[in-house]
Image (cartoon, grey):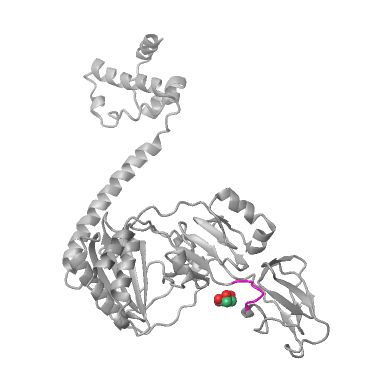
């Protein structure tokens, strides 16, 4: 099925790290008619009005005739070269009687609104409007994404959130790319920066890109409430609606879950699915979103006991999910025949029709799950015990000298007093405990005794030791 040139292309893509571009859609451009209350760009007979109190940055691309202009107290025009305004006396014959055109208030547009962003794999794809579908949390810029505000445009974005900062890899504003933290924070405090970005959280650039070819977790789950607060879910009519990880709404369609190993490359696999399947006419109506997510594992489907990274492929379909399910089966077929060469260990799917790939193998899966779960619980118990022990004792504040001394002392005790069975007690057979309390050891005798519980400590012996060291 895969033609030779395609195979070559796939190999070229391997090695490219996963990085996505997220482009802010709305603008505050003078030439965008959606920014005017009358739905049209003002012309020569019109009075142009900006709300007095609104701070706004407006990009002007060309020259405009106006009758009168009422400006805000604070704001700016960003004039393209050759752009400007001139006043016509009397009526503009091309414009009619003239109205008062009010520039709309852009202040309420939120960074965390997934509907206001477009995602693409490359800058070329952004330009060609070759957009990718994402679940809601990943429609908003992830920490390793490049954020793009269109080159010839102004904007106003409200970055309020419960977090103090919004980390991203880079931000491009008016065609200039900011990749360094200090440079961008300087821009944010400039006049333009303050008009464009407002709200309680600061966007910070310079976060590392995703270096893992198998993808990275978006990191927006902590903003889930904020993100989903802006989304209105449509009612769904399928038998068993699905809720993809990172999505705010239940959907009809299918979810393919992929377990991968070292050879897996998310970007190459996304491209593979596009070239083999999505180009086919019967899949034209499919929206496909593919990303790494951390799915919580459940013991016997109830008790959560951890998370594992996996690749989630969300397939949405306008036609009640029928095509999505066919595509899910096709993807599984492809995994069965080519999985090992593309780094996929296992894949399964669930469809909103109620069918899934794991219906037959569920009992075996359950046994494995239970065994695995028990192992995890044992590991957890051991870790808790270790943590409790560590937590009881303070960390060493002094270098190795006193530690050596006390360890040695512990051994000497064992040699010099072999009849005392107290030394068989595992509580004392912990070299790590004694080194942990050098301060107590050297300064406070009574505390030393109680904290370690070593009632064998003989002050005479202690003196000997000190003499030896002196
Ligand atoms: C005008 O603004 C709307 C909403 O902000 C946006 O969707 C549209 O793409 C803009 N038009 C152009 C030509 O950029």
Ligand 1, by image quadrant, is bottom right
Q: Quadrant of the N terminus?
A: bottom left
- Magenta-drawn stretch contains 387: no
Left or right: 314 as drawn, with respect to 98 = left
Residue 353, horizontal then vertical, whole percent: 28, 81
> In the rendered picture of this protein, how many numbered marks are placed on residues?
0
- Residue 293 in the image: above or below residue 464: below
* Residue lying at the far right of the rendered structure: 89
Residue at 63% from the left image edge and 56% from the top image edge:
188
The image quarter in which residue 419 lies:
top left
Specify the principal SS of the magenta part.
loop
Which residue is more in the foreground, 80 or 305? Answer: 80
Residue at 30% from the left image edge and 68% from the top image edge:
272
Residue 61, horizontal then vertical, whole percent: 65, 72
Residue 307, horizontal then vertical, whole percent: 33, 58
Whether residue 137 is visible:
no
- Magenta-drawn stretch contains 30: yes
- Residue 383 in the image: above or below residue 314: above
Which residue is more in the foreground, 369 or 327? Answer: 327
Which residue is more in the foreground, 345 or 45? Answer: 45
Q: Quadrant of the C terminus?
A: top left
Magenta stretch bounds: 27-32
Residue at 22% from the left image edge and 67% from the top image edge:
335
The image quarter in which residue 289 lies:
bottom left
Left or right: 273 as drawn, with respect to 173 = left
Whether residue 415 is visible:
yes
Residue at 56% from the left image edge and 50% from the top image edge:
181
């Amino acid at each position: 099925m895969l033609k030779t040139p395609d195979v070559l292309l796939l190999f070229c893509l391997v090695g490219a790290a996963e990085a996505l571009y997220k482009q802010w859609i709305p603008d505050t451009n003078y030439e965008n008619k959606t920014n005017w209350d009358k739905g049209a760009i003002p012309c020569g007979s019109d009075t142009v009005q900006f709300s007095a109190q609104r701070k706004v940055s407006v990009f002007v691309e060309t020259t405009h005739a106006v009758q009168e202009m009422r400006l805000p107290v604070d704001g700016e025009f960003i004039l393209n070269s050759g752009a400007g305004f001139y006043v016509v006396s009397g009526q503009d014959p091309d414009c009619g009687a003239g109205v008062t055109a009010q520039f709309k208030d852009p202040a309420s547009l939120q960074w965390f609104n997934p509907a206001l962003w477009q995602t693409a794999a490359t800058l070329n794809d952004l330009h060609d409007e070759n957009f990718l579908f994402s679940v809601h949390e990943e429609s908003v810029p992830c920490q390793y994404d490049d954020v793009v505000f269109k080159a010839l445009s102004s904007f106003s974005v409200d970055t309020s959130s419960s977090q103090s900062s919004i980390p991203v890899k880079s931000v491009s504003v008016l065609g200039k790319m900011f990749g360094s933290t200090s440079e961008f924070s300087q821009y944010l405090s400039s006049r333009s920066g303050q008009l464009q970005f407002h709200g309680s959280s600061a966007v910070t650039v310079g976060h590392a890109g995703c270096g893992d070819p198998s993808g990275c977790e978006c990191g927006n789950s902590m903003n889930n409430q904020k993100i989903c607060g802006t989304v209105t879910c449509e009612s769904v009519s399928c038998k068993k609606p699905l809720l993809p990880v990172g999505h705010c709404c239940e959907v009809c369609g299918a979810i393919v879950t992929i377990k991968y190993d070292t050879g897996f490359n998310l970007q190459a696999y996304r491209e593979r699915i596009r070239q083999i399947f999505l180009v086919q006419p019967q899949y034209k109506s499919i929206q496909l979103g593919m990303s790494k997510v951390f799915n919580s594992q459940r013991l016997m489907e109830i008790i959560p006991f951890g998370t594992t990274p996996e690749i989630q492929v969300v397939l949405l379909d306008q036609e009640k999910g029928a095509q999505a399910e066919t595509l899910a089966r096709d993807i599984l077929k492809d995994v069965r025949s080519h999985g090992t060469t593309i780094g996929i260990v296992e894949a399964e799917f669930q469809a909103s029709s109620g069918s899934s790939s794991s219906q037959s193998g569920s009992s075996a899966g359950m046994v494995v799950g239970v065994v695995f779960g028990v192992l995890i619980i044992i590991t957890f118990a051991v870790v808790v015990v270790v943590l409790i022990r560590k937590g009881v004792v303070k960390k060493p504040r002094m270098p190795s000298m006193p530690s050596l001394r006390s360890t040695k002392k512990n051994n000497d005790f064992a040699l010099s007093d072999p009849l005392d069975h107290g030394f068989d007690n595992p509580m004392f057979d912990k070299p790590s405990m004694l080194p942990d309390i050098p301060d107590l050891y050297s300064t406070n005798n009574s505390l030393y005794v109680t904290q370690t519980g070593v009632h064998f400590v003989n002050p005479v012996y202690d003196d000997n030791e000190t003499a030896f060291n002196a």
